[in-house]
Amino acid sequence: MTASYPALRLRRTRASAWSRRLHAETVLTPADLIWPLFVTEGQGVEEPIASLPGVSRWSLDGIVARAREAADLGIPCLALFPNTPSHLRSDDGREALNPDNLMCRAIGAIKDAVPEIGVLTDVALDPYTTHGHDGLVDDAGYVVNDSTADALVQQALTQARAGSDVIAPSDMMDGRIGMIRNALEAEGFANVQIMAYAAKYASAFYGPFRDAVNTRGLLKGDKKTYQMDHANAEEALREVALDLAEGADSVMVKPGLPYLDIIRRVKEEFRVPTFAYQVSGEYAMIETAVAAGAADRDAMVLETLMAFKRAGCSGVLTYHAAHAARLLNA
């Protein structure tokens, strides 16, 4: 070896496991995870979802058991999504405003049993409508903005009264964050957070989720008039800026891995708590690769979650939350 060889060897700090841990620039822990769960009616019910291998719909007793599991694993928050019975769905989604609906009963059951865990609730009408859209639809099939936003305010208040800790509007209607924030303040819910689905794209990765909440066969057309065009990045920054100005406490980019560039730009531009949703299609791709023998689940789960943290995420909604937490706790 010649004397001119560089004095700095970057491999030096990678030579042993203890040193790699010491020099890690990004840290992933169970506290970075939010676990999405699907709620269904009944008692003692677990309904596996074929397009989401390893994920099920749970009746309230099962949801409470998952909440206890999450608390034991160090997962700080659950995200709830209801499978509303078909006879309770309507064109106007009025079941979303029912204080005794499935979502509200799930919130109450979790808060009674595991009060220390956070509950994040989805605000959008698609699990409650007969047409599968996130809002109210006019005679031409267009999802109307302002009357939908009025309904979302009432939905958010219904969930806050039931005990939701974080209201998460996923609908992408203009102006709804400010309206919800004002309504929460007026009713004394000053400490209820809003995590805005600020940059939610009209994505091809949502299919298994629609199976989980039974909306895939209901959806008329697509959601491109209100969810974002995947060609656009500057528009995402405008959406985030508006939601923050209207009172959002944190923002979300959805889907996740195909939009790491958006996550990074949002974090660098605004320096606010930024979350990503590793959506159902992303989860299914990993599980399909594992089933085909093309990937190692443990390694792939941890690598993808680390990618979100490295891009700037404060946390990640992921169906792999419990599995990842077990790996991280080992």
Image: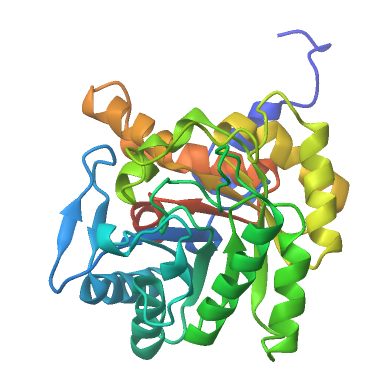
Instruction: Tell which residue pokes out farthest to the top in this image.
Output: 2
Q: Would you place residue 269 above or below residue 58 in this image? A: above
Where 234 falls versus 267 (above or below)? above
Q: Is residue 293 above or below residue 61?
A: above
Nearest the eye: 51 or 214: 214
Q: Residue at x 46, y 67 (%)?
A: 94
Q: Quadrant of residue 314?
A: bottom right
Q: Which residue is found at the position 66% from the left and 74% from the top?
A: 193
For the point 42% across and 46% down, which residue is it?
131
In this rendering, would 206 be left or right of 72?
A: right
Determine the residue positioned at 27% across, 37% down: 51
Q: Nearer the viewer, residue 139 or 72?
A: 139
- Can the viewer see residue 34? yes
Q: Quadrant of the N terminus?
A: top right
* Nearest the eye: 71 or 194: 194
Colouring scheme, one of rainbow, by chain, secondary structure, one colour: rainbow
Q: Position of residue 66 (x, y in %)?
A: 30, 69
Instruction: Please tell me which residue lies in front, 49 or 29.
Output: 49
Image check: 57 left or right of 100?
left
Q: Which percent across, then down, holds residue 61?
A: 22, 76
